Image (spheres, rainbow, N blue to C red):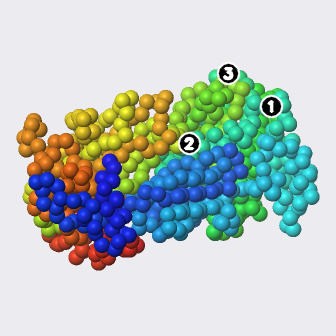
Amino acid sequence: MKKSSLIAVATALLALSGCADHSAFGPQPGQDEKEYNHFDFSTVNNQVAVNIEYSVNLEAGVFFSIYDQEPGSWVENAYVLKDGIQPLYSGWTSKDGTFSASLSLPSYLKKVYVYTPAMFSTRIMEAEVNGSQINVAEKNYASQAATRATEENTWGAFITDIDLDDWFDWIFNHQSGNNNYSYMVAGKTRPAEYNDGNWKDWLVTYNTQGMLDKKSLIGNNDKKDEDLYLGKQLAGKLYEVHQAVINVNQKECPQELRSEYDMLITKEGEIAINFLGGSTCWNSSLGYYVYRDGQKPASLDQANVVLVFPNTQDGFKTKTYNGESTKGVFTGSCVKLKYYPNIASGSKEGATYKFPAGYRIGFVLATNAWSNRIKNCGSNYRVRSATSSGLSVDRNGKIFDVPRTAVYKYKDKDTNKDYVMVSFEDNTDDNNFSDVVFTLTTRATIDKIPDVDPKVEVNELKGIYAFEDLWPAKGDYDMNDVMTKSTYTKLIDSKNNIYEESYTFKTYGNYATLVSGLAVRLDGVSATDKLEFYVKSADAEEFSVLNTTYDTNDKVVVLANDVNNNKGAEYKVKVIHAEKSPVEKQTIEAEPFIFRAKDADDKVAWWEVHLTGYKPTSKVDTGLFNTGDDCSQPEKDIYYVRKGNYPFAFFLAGATDEDLSPMLDPNNESMPIDKLYSGYSGWVTSNGATNTDWYKSAQ
């Protein structure tokens, strides 16, 4: 809900003249004009120009989140998010890796942290806030950028979109000093010993780096198999799918996606594996095995694994690790798999690209099995992650009792084809299931793979609202009579289209003796939107339906008639847009306010407290304005203003429970806000020009 324009004008006049000029308002009939503070107590900068640029090498958006503090830390080779930290904004870049928008962000920001779970991009970047502008570019993080390729390095281009003969010619002419990129027709090296059966390297040939030769790969010049390899555009789309369903806004892979499932072939045909990438410094090996349905091998010793990628390291980089010299695979590498009917007897006889119906295909990742590894990254742990239950083993040889893979399917609307996605966890440190990620393209039919919808639900911290409950009388201005934290949630696709918007309001225990209800005014609701309301008590685990209604006249939803009847409760207001008509940006604004209804039927006017300058509802008792401490002038659209340095209510953008712990401390009850925060007075007297971080404990 917009503030009165006259408040903004008055504030501008005050800034120009250095003192308040009240003559612009003039006395009103039957009302004595009161002097009031023209400062609007806003903690929001509504026009922050944010520009972010990732150096992507494929047509894929990058999901990112903006934080006001370091959101995590590096644990071994994984960036792990801290508990309880919410971003100020989350979204996707365009497919060229860029994002530019004007955002509403807290005024206190001096520095931001931009995090992404994307396996091809720099995990965390920092940027200073320059006035009302934030510029972040991955190219400034070259030492740790995990982009895997540049336009100048042809060998790093997307392998399915280049001529493989040209690619190998380039390698011959650009051998590094340690011959890491020299292709060896003979004398290839095997990976480290597996100690879990005889992995067959019948399918592929590779060099000392672990890179496959061109005979082992499908490229864009293989017209007969062009439907089995991914082009840049489709691979980029699947890369977005992986971000959406595995990593976006998650510390760990969602439990519902983790599975132990070997894919059942219900119609014979060819199968190819397309390498999408990885997010680990470990140099692992990937293989597959085939068995008749119902005859799953008892162990990897009996699985007869066929090697596909001897070295899955694709150039992982951080401040600590650099995988360029141990790189063994390029993003987009595609291998057509073979079925070996006589593999159990050690024979290649009868090998065919057609996999028969009634058989299952499984995959296994041998952690750090390749001998040429990134320095100081992991030990020679014999961890094995398999799609079959009972075949994944930890470093001590003990069978994992939880899945180490995520298997899911995405149906592309443009090609009308299904793409099976497989994501591996190689160790037990982060559970992000992004250490090796690939997709299967098939001419066979694979049954019973769960479909995923790549829409993402993300949360953004808005801040905390604080109210005085004695309006219009003078209060103690400890600002803690009613407090509620606002979190904004949106369901978005990779184009940032929004399908659902919701606000959650968390209340706090307080020591106020007066009854105060909590309501929210919604702005931006359309006739085709669907509204849902929920509540969760402090001791409950799940939300339940809240029995309330939406007043279309005032655009108001009553959340609680007395917040003290359910202290610590959370209230959720959800707006669901029409499925075929998502909105392109946030359209729903939610303004909470406190109220008292004088009778159950609302036939008598309400007592209401809103933020400085915000209009009341049509139910308000207008006789209360311009009485006591209140200096409102309804005829001028001026509401909830007063003389002095305290408001009746304010919104503290980006505030957390920790920030406002002094206000929630019972020992500070009735203590004015400026006595709790030393920077408060300077903030008010400067009209918000200084001390903008007065309430931030971490600043």
Count neighbours of disc 3 (C-alpha within 10 A) and say few if under 14, some if 14 to 19, many if 20 or more. Answer: some
Q: Pick whichever, 253 or 403, lies toward us.
A: 253
| Residue found 63% across the figure and 69% down from its top | 319
Image location of residue 571, percent across then percent down: 27, 45
Tell me the residue that label 3 is attached to: 267
Tell me the residue that label 2 is attached to: 494
| Residue found 67% across the figure and 21% down from its top | 267
| Residue found 42% across the figure and 33% down from its top | 577
Image location of residue 286, percent across then percent down: 70, 47
Q: Is residue 439 left or right of residue 634?
A: right
Q: Amino acid at mark 2?
A: Ser
Counting residues from the N terminus, which is met first, the one under dot 1 or under dot 2? Answer: 1
Looking at the rendered image, the quarter that the C terminus falls into is bottom left
Image location of residue 628, percent across then percent down: 10, 62
Tell me which corner region of the image, top left, top right, bottom left or bottom right, holds residue 200.
top right
Q: Amino acid at mark 3?
A: Lys
Q: Which mark is residue 113?
A: none
Image location of residue 174, percent across then percent down: 89, 60
- Residue 692, can we see it? no
Tell me which corner region of the image, top left, top right, bottom left or bottom right, holds residue 350.
top right
Cα distance in 3D space between marks 1 and 2: 29 Å
Circle 1/circle 2 CB separation < 8 Å: no
Q: Which mark is residue 225?
A: 1
The local secondary structure at tag 1 comes to helix
Which numbered mark, 1 or 2, is in the foreground of this view? 2
The local secondary structure at tag 3 comes to strand
The local secondary structure at tag 2 comes to loop
